Image (cartoon, rainbow, N blue to C red):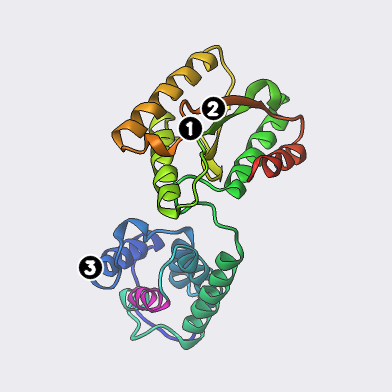
Amino acid sequence: MTDTGTHAASPAALLRSWHATSVQSVWRRPGDWYTPAAEALAEALDARLDTAPAAYRLGQARSAAGVGITEAIDDMAVLFKAAGFASAPIRSVRALCEGWTEGATVVAAQPPVVDAESGLGTADYLKQRLAEVYGAATRRGEQVPRTHALVMVDVSVDSADPWQRMARNATIGEALRTAYPEGHPIARLGDGLYCVLISRDASLGNDLAMLRDHIVLRCSTAQVGNLTRQPARLWVEPLPESNTYASQLVDSLQR
C-alpha cells in the first residue's frame, strides 16, 4: 500500500474508531458489524502491510452475513479515513468486491438450513448437527446410540390446501421451539413431520407425554387442531453407529 496517513496508536484503537464511526454513519445493523476479518484488516493497515488480502476476506465475511456491496465499501472507506487516508486504495476496494462476490457465490451454493414454513431447521441442518455429535462422541470415546436419539413428531393429515399446510407447520414449529430449550436441534422433514435431536436420559418417557400435551394445547390456542393428527404420533428413532448411516436415516425419514 503506497498511501500514507496518520493512524491510531494501536490496531485495537483503530478498530474501535472504525466501528464507532461506521455505526454512526453508514452501518445499518450495529449488532452484526464485528467480524474477525475486520480486525485483521485493521491490523494490516496499522502495520503498513498490503491490505488487499485482508480486504478480500472482509468482503467474503460481509457477503456471508448478508451485507450489501455498497454498505461494505462505505464501511471500509470509514476505516481508511479513521486511519488518516483520504480514501481506500483502489487495489483494496477491488479485493473487497472480489471477496464479496466470492462469498455470495458460496452462500448461494449452500443448501438452506432454515425451513421457511416452520422456522425450524432443514434436513441438511439436522445432518450437520448430527455430524458434530458423532465427531464429539468419537473424541470422547462414546457411542452415539447410547447417548442420543431422534424424537419424531407426526401430525400430518391429508390436505391439499397450501394455507392449511403452512398454518400447521408454523404452529408445530412454534410448539417445538417452546417445548425444547435452545440448543436442541429441531428440523422439519416433511409436511407435518418433525424431528428433535435429544440426549437420552431417564426422563425421556415423561418428556414425550408432556410434549404431546404441549402440542395439543398449542394447536388449540392457534385454532388449528382440525389441521393436525389427533393425538400427535410421537416415537423415539434410535440412531445408528456411524454418522454415514445417520445421514442415510435422515434421508429415509423425509417425505
- State the mark number for residue 229: 1
Asked if 147 appears above or below 3 in the picture, the reply is above
Q: Answer few, some or many: residues within 10 Å of disc 3's Cα (few below 14, many 20 plus, some between 14 and 19).
A: few
Q: Answer few, some or many: residues within 10 Å of disc 1's Cα (few below 14, many 20 plus, some between 14 and 19).
A: some
Q: Nearer the viewer, residue 79 or 59?
A: 59
Q: Amino acid at mark 2?
A: Arg
Residue at label 2?
A: 233
Gap between marks 3 and 1, in whole Å? 52 Å
> What kind of element bears circle 2?
strand
Q: Nearer the viewer, residue 125 or 61?
A: 125
Gap between marks 1 and 2, in whole Å? 7 Å
**Number of residue marks:** 3
Residue at label 3?
A: 24
Residue 12 in magenta?
Answer: no
Dominant SS in magenta = helix
Point out the residue furthest to the top here: 202
Gap between marks 2 and 3, in whole Å? 52 Å
> What kind of element bears circle 3?
helix
User: Which-is-in-front pick, marks 2 and 3?
Assistant: 2
> What kind of element bears circle 1?
loop
Q: Nearer the viewer, residue 37 or 144?
A: 144
Residue 253, position in %: x, y? Answer: 66, 39
Q: Which residues are magenta?
A: 69-78
| Label 1–label 2 contact, CB within 8 A | yes
Instruction: Tell me which numbered mark, 3 or 1, is placed earlier along the sequence.
Output: 3
Residue 117, position in %: x, y? Answer: 44, 51
Q: Amino acid at mark 3?
A: Gln
Q: Answer few, some or many: residues within 10 Å of disc 2's Cα (few below 14, many 20 plus, some between 14 and 19).
A: few
| Label 2–label 3 contact, CB within 8 A | no
Asked if 194 appears above or below 235 in the picture, the reply is below
User: Which-is-in-front pick, marks 3 and 1?
Assistant: 1
Residue 255, position in %: x, y? Answer: 63, 46
